[in-house]
Amino acid sequence: MLELQSLLGQQGATFAVAALAAICIGGIVYALFQPMLSGVKRRDERMNVITSRSQSVEARKKLKDGDRRRRSVQDQLKEFEERQRKKQQKRDSVSLNERMEQAGLSWEMKHFVFFSIASGIVFLIGGLVFAQNLLVALGLGFAGAIGFPRWFVNYKRRKRFNAFLDELPGAVDIIVRGVKAGLPLGDCIKIVAREAAEPVATEFGKIVETQVMGVSLTDAVLRLPTRVPVAEANFFAIVVSIQQKSGGGLSEALGNLSKVLRGRKSMKRKITALSSEAKASAMIIGSLPFIVSGLLYLIAPDYVSLLFERTTGQLIVAGGLFWMFCGIMVMRNMINFDF
């Protein structure tokens, strides 16, 4: 009897252990597979897919818009570069009338001809008075009639370009402040044409006049580099044209342009200061032979006059002047920085 009770007790304990083990295993299985069976996991996965899909679509849209705008800007820059390359090819063949207009001279061709004739006569009389030699006087008259008027036009043109570059950053700053205040770009250009110094006021006034005639603002601004063929005017035209076609913050773009223009201006002045010593040395070296020859002529005129009276001396003088000209051109190229 006791043995039967002990056997039943052992079987009950084994059954209890097995039941507990089955319950534990069932609980673990239920905990692992319950989300899949109830659909919670599938719901969460579906929500994640939907959420990530919307974000990816928005991101793809932004990326596509950014790529489209970047391609648009690149195409416009290529177009401007091609246009600038064609202008650079035509720049060497600029007509005399265009050069006089770029120099700010209100001359016609007849005025230039009259100025050339008067200059030639003055140089001819000066050669006859000081050199007392007909060939020298004719050479000076030819240089005065042909070379000096063109040099004068180029000098005025270069001086006007430098004045434009000095005033352009201030004009861009006026436009930036006006745009930030809420004024349209056309009104800001009118303010510059009215308040800025010359020659910026004249050039921006021509933009306003062109716009009044029915030309769009972009085309009117794009004509500025034609009248003032400098890199800074081309930068301004490119920034305005790209902003008008692609949109964006005009005040920020023009503010960056103003910083670039002032940086280029500062760099140009720094280069001028650093090269001033070399330019002074070149001027001294170039003028030294003439000064020494003049002093020798004052001290011993008979000794120096042999160079001008005899054919051998004249050939020597001509050869010396030629090699001096070559040396001056070499020094000029060495100290003439283009950036």
Image: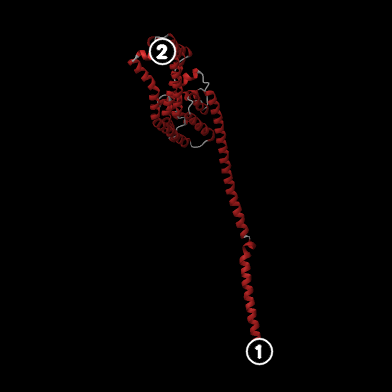
Residue 198 on image: x %, y %: 41, 24
Point out residue 206 in the picture as x, y percentages from the top left corner.
47, 23
Residue that badge 2 annotates: 308
Distance between the Cα atoms at labels 1 and 2? 155 Å
Label located before the other in sequence (1 or 2):
1
Answer with the quarter of the image where residue 148 lies. Answer: top left
Residue that appears at 63% across and 81% down:
13
- Whether residue 127 is visible to the viewer of this picture, yes or no, is yes
Location of mark 1 (residue) = 3
Residue that appears at 51% across and 18% down: 95
Label 1: element kind: helix
Determine crowd level at label 1: few under 14, some 14-19, many 20+ residues with C-alpha closer than 10 A: few
**Viewed as shown, does residue 58 lie left or right of 99?**
right
Q: Nearer the viewer, residue 223 or 41?
A: 223
Determine the image quadrant of residue 166: top left
Residue at image location 53% in from the left, 28% down from the top: 84
Residue 86 located left or right of residue 285: right
Q: Is residue 103 visible?
A: no
- Height in image: 38 above or below 107? below
Please state which of the two labelled residues, at mark 1 or mark 2, is closer to the viewer.
Answer: 2
The N terminus, quarter of image:
bottom right
Amino acid residing under circle 1: Glu
